[in-house]
Image (cartoon, rainbow, N blue to C red):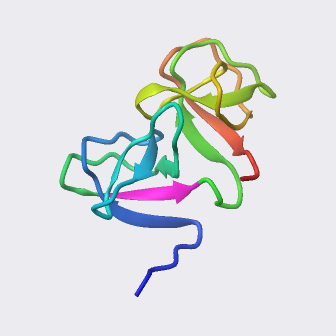
Amino acid sequence: MATNYIGAGTFLANTTITNALGVVLSSNGGVGLATTTSCDGFALIDAASGDYVSVAFLTNNGTLKGTLAAAPVTAGDTIYLAASGTVSTTGTVTIGKSKTTTSTTGAVIEFVPKNI
């Protein structure tokens, strides 16, 4: 029987995952770090490999938080998937719109997810 998640769910971390990194569901029912082409949601807490991590899905109502791969970003900028679960102002797969302005690489930014 399948499990339905509304907003967030808890999954086994297949690798070390830090709060605000993008994740993708794996075939074993756990999650790994998102790639530049695939992301299902964003981690809400830190988790070591083998621990459980709470994930807010991209279909979640409201804003999400992501880790910026490279600064700067300005509120209103389009946000894209970047490597290793991060987000960027450049890329090919749109993830949303930034609500944060910062010039700090690695900063956690708030964004409005794209309607997927």
Residue 59 quadrant? bottom right
Q: Give the farthest residue toward the left.
A: 50
Q: Is residue 9 above or below residue 41?
A: below
Question: For residue 37: magenta?
Answer: no
- 112 vs 45, left or right, is right
Q: Position of residue 63 (x, y in %)?
A: 68, 49
Question: For residue 54: magenta?
Answer: yes
Q: Residue at x 71, y 55 (%)?
A: 62
The residue nearer to you, when weighing 91 against 77, is 91
Q: Give the farthest residue toward the right.
A: 76
Residue 3 quadrant? bottom left
What number of labels is visible?
A: 0
Q: Is residue 111 above or below residue 91?
A: below
Q: Residue at x 32, y 64 (%)?
A: 29
Most common SS among magenta residues: strand
Which image quadrant: the N terminus?
bottom left
Q: Residue at x 50, y 47 (%)?
A: 42
The residue nearer to you, when weighing 7 against 92, is 92
Q: Residue at x 51, y 15 (%)?
A: 105
Q: Is residue 74 above or below residue 41?
A: above
Q: Position of residue 110 (x, y in %)?
A: 64, 38
Q: Position of residue 92 (x, y in %)?
A: 65, 26
Q: Which residues are magenta?
A: 53-57
- 21 vs 112, left or right, is left
- 93 vs 105, left or right, is right
The residue nearer to you, when weighing 81 against 97, is 81
Q: Position of residue 45 (x, y in %)?
A: 39, 50
